[in-house]
Image (cartoon, helix red, strand yellow):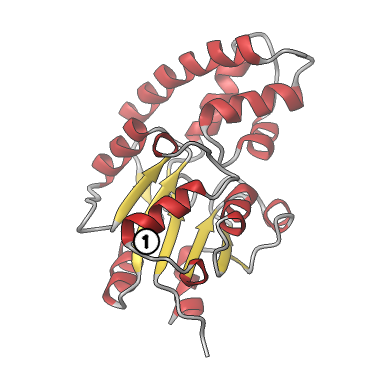
Amino acid sequence: MKQRIELVVFDMAGTTVNEDNVVYKTVQKVINDEGFSVSLEEVLKHAAGKEKHQAITAVLKACTPLTNTALVANIAFSKFKIALKEAYDSLEIKTFEGTEQLFKDLRNNHIKVVLNTGYDRKTADLLLDKLGWIVGETIDGLVTADDVENGRPEGDMILLAMKNIGITDAEKVLKVGDSAIDIEEGKNANCGITVGVLTGAQNRAQIQEANPTYIIESLNELRAILF
């Protein structure tokens, strides 16, 4: 018998939103503009899924000789916000094939759909506008890094999503994302199921390090897990 799930918490970029890793390419650019030469692979390894100031700091600590990263991280982050807005304004944002139908199928089966993200609220709302997704119609909720004290890997965003939806049993929550930190977040919130999806920032081996319940090729495989 399948485990009863009442809420699925989806990560955004790389999981439900296909933006060709533009956020991590932008992180790479603003760091390298400060005189470094980090690779996109390094950025994906150390930054995936994190709140973006935290992500920049993590890459600086892991991939540069800096001993005190605070000043450079602040400068890079202020440039990042401007650069990302410019990138998103001109980029065609799309979703992965079948995602909107999956949302409908989940909601028709009395499973709530909430998006969560390491983006700030402004960026997340911009993405929803570009996709035409409406809270209360397409999805049941959105929680961003701005809405909680502690970002990933802490479980605060999932716990807030549960509170907003009115679910108290974390065993009835499934968390899905494209990076190991999404899985860690799900485990820290005591989610009943954690799922890694291979459409975004990290590969199977990187996601497997966090030991998810499942790793899937696309979100459409969630139906086999849930229905």
Looking at the picture, tell me which residue is in the foreground, 54 or 171: 171
Amino acid under disc 1: Thr
The spot of residue 216 in percent (x, y) is 58, 66
The quarter of the rendered structure image containing the C terminus is bottom left
Left or right of 12? Residue 61 is right
Instruction: Locate residue 183: give its quadrant.
Output: bottom right
Looking at the picture, tell me which residue is in the foreground, 103 or 181: 181
Q: How crowded is mark 1: few (under 14 residues within 10 Å), some or many (20 or more)?
A: some
Q: Name the residue under label 1.
A: 99
Q: How many marks?
A: 1
| Residue under the point 29% across and 38% down | 125
> Does 219 appear above or below 76?
below
Looking at the picture, tell me which residue is in the foreground, 211 or 206: 211
> Does 96 appear above or below 102?
above
The spot of residue 222 in percent (x, y) is 48, 71
Report helix, strand or loop for mark 1. Answer: helix
The spot of residue 152 in percent (x, y) is 56, 43
- Confirm whether residue 85 shows in the render: yes
> Does 151 appear above or below 159?
above
| Residue under the point 42% across and 25% down | 84
- Confirm whether residue 91 shows in the render: no
